Each structure stands twice: as C-alpha cells, then as structure tokens.
Image: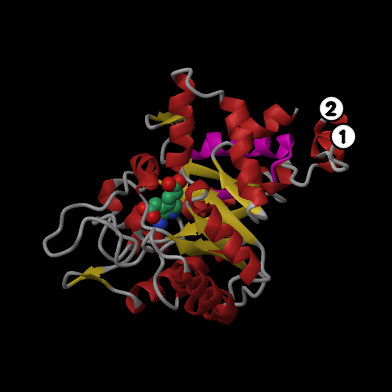
C-alpha cells in the first residue's frame, strides 16, 4: 500500500513551491542600520563587518538616495561620537547641532519619504561606554530615562519619524512618550528594543562606534545589570508587555537568530508589530564563513532572513538589507 498523502507533491518543482510558500522576503521588510561619522568624503570599512561602512554626512546623502532607489524605505541611524565630546551624562546627545541631529536632517533632505529611526541610548556619547549615567557603581535608571526623553525630543525636533530606545532602563518608554506628547510630537513613534539581551554578538557594533564599556572601579565591564540574561524567556514577555503598556508602537527582539523562540513567543503575546535585530555578530559570522568558502553566502543569508520572518518578525533590522535587495533583483 502506498500513502494517499504524499507531501512531496507540493515540492516537486519551483512553480508549485512558489505557490505554496508561506514566507516571502521583500524590501519592505527591512530597516537599514547606518553608521555616521564626522568629516567629509569618509567611507571607512568596519574591520569586523566586511563591506559595511561608517560614512560622513555627504556620503550618507548619496547612500540614502541609493537605498530609496533600491526600494528600501526605512533607516536606523547610529553615530560615532568623537572622544572629546563624550562624558558621563551624554551631554552631546542633546546638542541640536549634534551629529545625530544633522544626520536626521541629511536623510530627510536626500529623501523626504525615507523613514528615519534613531538609536536612543547614551553609549555612543558615554565616556564609560554605558547606556546610562554611571554613579556610585551603578547605572542610574530614572536619571537616565530623563536624558533619553530629552534626547528623543531633540531627535523629533530634527525630523525623526521614530525614536528607538536601545538602553533597557525600566520605565523609559513612558517617560519618552510623555515628553514627546508634551512637546507636541504626538506623531513621532517609538520602536522599543523591548527584549534586548546582554549578548556577545554585539562585539562588531561596538568596534564600529567605539562604544564598548571601559574599566571603571566598582562597575562591571558588561551590560548585564540592564540588558537581559540570555537564559530567560518569561522575562522577555514581561519586558515587552510593559513597553506596549507604556506606549511602544513597535517592539523588538535582539539579537535575531539565536532568539527565534523569543520572537515567536512575543509575536503570539502582543498585537503591535514585532521587529527583530539581526545584529552585527550575526552578520560577521556569515561574512567570515563565506570568506573562507565554508558557507554559501547568499543562500545562507536568505535562509536566515526567512527564519526570522517565519518566527514572527514583521520588520528586520539587518546589515544584509542591500545584499538581499540586489539578490532579489
Ligand atoms: C547601543 C546598541 C547596541 C546595538 C544597538 N544599539 C550595542 C549594545 O547594546 O552594546 C547592537 C547592534 C549590533 O550589534 O548590531 N545601545
């Protein structure tokens, strides 16, 4: 007796596979992270992120036009702040003429419809490389949230469409939401890094921005007192639910591939769009393996992105965005 049901019927050629495919990648899925530096004519490759660059504002202008032409519609901005401008309070983050504020205007000038999201955290501005203010051996929570709220208003004033707090302080979404409302920015959205783990996959990113935590007496040289323990699942749900209740428009899980279970869990739990951040270490791993000829770059890249969407992500922040769109043709 042969089986009545043969699952292979739906796999026998590419046409039928296309017909029944459940998960499709399109340019609309992507948020493109961009690293901005001071200067002119600068496009420098990040050593631990092959073919990914830091760029000055003039080249950011060109890059954004290219991205838009390719069909990409949203960017996520990060700035590399000169050492001389860093302090413990992140003072430079509030400078209306700061690099981030100018970068936002540059993107909007190049392409008014390009959606601009901005990283909101103190680490690129902190002389200690922490996401918050350091005092008495601690990363201060409420004082940091106040600065993040001011920073968010400053980004909104410069033209940001969404602010993206990546710091993991408690209660900051509400503090930011209230500040935005008070200043008349009721249409500025919040994409919260709601389930952000204390991950070693962020290494290349910290190289890119020179933002790694430094040695300070009595303060651990890691972010484990605010970012989540990779061992925890229920906590991710609690964190995310809390951010939704405080007014987050979009929530995020970060990193991506090692946390697919969390992506699915969050997707089942909340009714706002779920983003996932395929982080710098995930990018570096594939680039390195492909360089050695150990993995096929394009096929593995697509498989990873399909996996992130299949797990429940509606939006993917990825350094592969351009590679993917080129591949899709
Ligand atoms: C900073 C921030 C980090 C990333 C995004 N925002 C690094 C960190 O928390 O140390 C990591 C992104 C990546 O690795 O691609 N708050």
On the question of residue 231 being in view, the answer is: yes
User: Residue 47 placed where, x, y %?
Assistant: 37, 29
Residue 162 sits in which quadrant?
bottom right
Q: Is mark 1 within 8 Å of ligand 1?
A: no
Residue 111 % position (x, y)? 69, 45
Q: CA distance from mark 1 to mark 2?
A: 6 Å
Q: How many other residues sit within 10 Å of disc 1, few (<14), some (14-19) or many (≥20)?
A: few
Q: In this picture, which residue range is highlighted in magenta? A: 56-76
Which residue is rendered at x = 85% and y = 35% of the image? 9
Ligand 1 near label 2 (Cβ, under 8 Å)? no
Asked which secondary structure carries label 1, the reply is helix
Q: Residues within 10 Å of mark 2 (few under 14, many from 20)?
A: few
- Mark 2 residue element: loop
- Viewer-nearest residue: 97 or 173: 173
Quarter of the image where one finds residue 48: top left
Which residue does the image show at 44% across and 34% down from the upper left?
A: 284
**In the shown orientation, is residue 279 left or right of residue 68?**
left
Q: Residue lying farthest top?
A: 293
Residue sitting nearer the eye, 195 or 23: 23
Give yes or no for contact between labels 1 and 2 (Cβ–Cβ under 8 Å).
yes
Q: Is residue 72 magenta?
A: yes
Q: At 48% from the left edge and 17% from the top edge, which residue is drawn? A: 293
252 relative to 283, above or below: below
The residue wearing badge 1 is 16
The residue positioned farthest toward the front in the image shown: 1
Please identify the quadrant where the C terminus is shown: top right
Going by the image, does 171 lie left or right of 115?
left
Residue appearing at x 38%, y 64% in the figure: 228
The image position of residue 259, as x and y in percent, is 50, 53
Q: Is residue 69 above or below residue 136?
A: above
Q: Which circle marks residue 13 in the picture?
A: 2
The spot of residue 190 in percent (x, y) is: 58, 67
């Amino acid at each position: 007796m042969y089986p009545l049901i043969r699952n292979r019927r739906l796999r026998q050629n590419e046409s039928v596979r296309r017909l029944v495919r459940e998960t499709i990648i399109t340019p609309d899925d992507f948020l493109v992270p961009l690293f901005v530096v001071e200067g002119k004519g600068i496009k420098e490759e990040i050593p631990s992120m092959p073919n990914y660059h830091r760029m000055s504002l003039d080249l950011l202008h060109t890059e954004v036009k290219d991205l838009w032409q390719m069909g990409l519609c949203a960017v996520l901005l990060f700035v590399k702040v000169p050492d001389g401008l860093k302090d413990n309070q992140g003072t430079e983050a509030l400078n209306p003429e700061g690099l981030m504020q100018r970068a936002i205007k540059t993107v909007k000038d190049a392409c008014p419809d390009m959606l601009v999201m901005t990283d909101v955290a103190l680490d690129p501005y902190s002389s200690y490389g922490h996401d918050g203010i350091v005092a008495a051996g601690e990363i201060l929570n409420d004082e940091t949230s106040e600065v993040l709220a001011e920073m968010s208003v400053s980004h909104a004033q410069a033209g940001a469409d969404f602010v993206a707090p990546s710091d993991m302080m408690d209660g900051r979404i509400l503090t930011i939401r209230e500040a935005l409302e008070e200043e008349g920015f009721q249409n500025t959205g919040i994409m919260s890094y709601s389930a952000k783990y204390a991950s070693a996959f962020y290494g290349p990113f910290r190289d890119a921005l020179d933002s790694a935590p430094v040695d300070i007496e009595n303060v651990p040289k890691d972010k484990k007192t605010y970012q989540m323990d990779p061992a925890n699942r229920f906590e991710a749900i609690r964190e995310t639910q809390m951010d939704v209740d405080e007014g987050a428009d979009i929530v995020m899980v970060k990193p991506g591939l090692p946390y697919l279970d969390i992506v699915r869990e969050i997707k089942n739990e909340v009714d706002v769009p779920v983003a996932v951040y395929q982080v710098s270490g995930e990018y570096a791993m594939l680039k390195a393996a492909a360089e050695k000829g150990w993995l096929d770059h394009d096929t593995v890249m697509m498989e990873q992105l399909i996996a992130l969407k299949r797990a429940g992500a509606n939006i993917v922040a990825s350094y592969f965005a351009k590679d993917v769109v080129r591949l899709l043709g």
